[in-house]
């Protein structure tokens, strides 16, 4: 997702994995660990954008 792409308010697990450039399994582990919040809609797991943003904000910054 480029910098000009608007990120939707609710994302699926595969969308979050693509956004974070990680595996679907990694996102699922973070959800189980409570590091991101999600809601179920039938079989789909929906993750609010603010939850992904909070997860990223909580990560330590890497200095070069």
Image: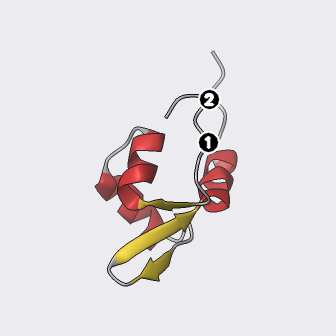
- For the point 43% across and 81% down, the residue is 41
**How far apart in space, not on screen, are marks 1 and 2 (Cα)?**
6 Å
- For the point 31% across and 47% down, the residue is 23
Q: Is residue 18 visible?
A: yes
Coordinates of residue 46 in the picture (x, y in percent):
48, 69
- For the point 66% across and 33% down, the residue is 61
Quadrant where the image shows the C terminus:
top right
Q: Secondary structure at mark 2?
A: loop
**Total marks in image:** 2
- For the point 45% across and 62% down, the residue is 30
Coordinates of residue 7 in the picture (x, y in percent):
59, 47
Q: How is the image coloured?
A: secondary structure
43 to 6, vertically: above or below = below
- CB atoms of marks 1 and 2 within 8 Å: no
Tell me the quarter of the picture where residue 32 sits. bottom left
28 to 63, vertically: above or below = below
Tell me the quarter of the picture where residue 63 sits. top right
Coordinates of residue 58 in the picture (x, y in percent):
67, 50
Q: Secondary structure at mark 1?
A: loop
Q: Which residue is mark 1?
A: 6
Q: Is residue 35 visible?
A: no
8 to 44, vertically: above or below = above
Residue extending furthest top? 64
Give me the disc on residue 63.
none
Q: Nearer the viewer, residue 18 or 58?
A: 18
Classify 10 Å Cα crowding around label 1: few (below 14), some (14-19), many (20 and above).
Answer: few
Classify 10 Å Cα crowding around label 2: few (below 14), some (14-19), many (20 and above).
Answer: few
Give me the disc on residue 4.
2
């Amino acid at each position: 997702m480029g910098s000009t792409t608007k990120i939707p308010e609710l994302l699926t697990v595969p969308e979050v994995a693509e956004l974070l450039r990680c595996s679907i399994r990694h996102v699922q582990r973070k959800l189980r660990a409570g590091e991101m919040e999600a809601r179920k809609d039938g079989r789909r797991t929906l993750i609010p954008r603010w939850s992904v943003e909070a997860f990223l904000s909580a990560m330590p910054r890497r200095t070069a």
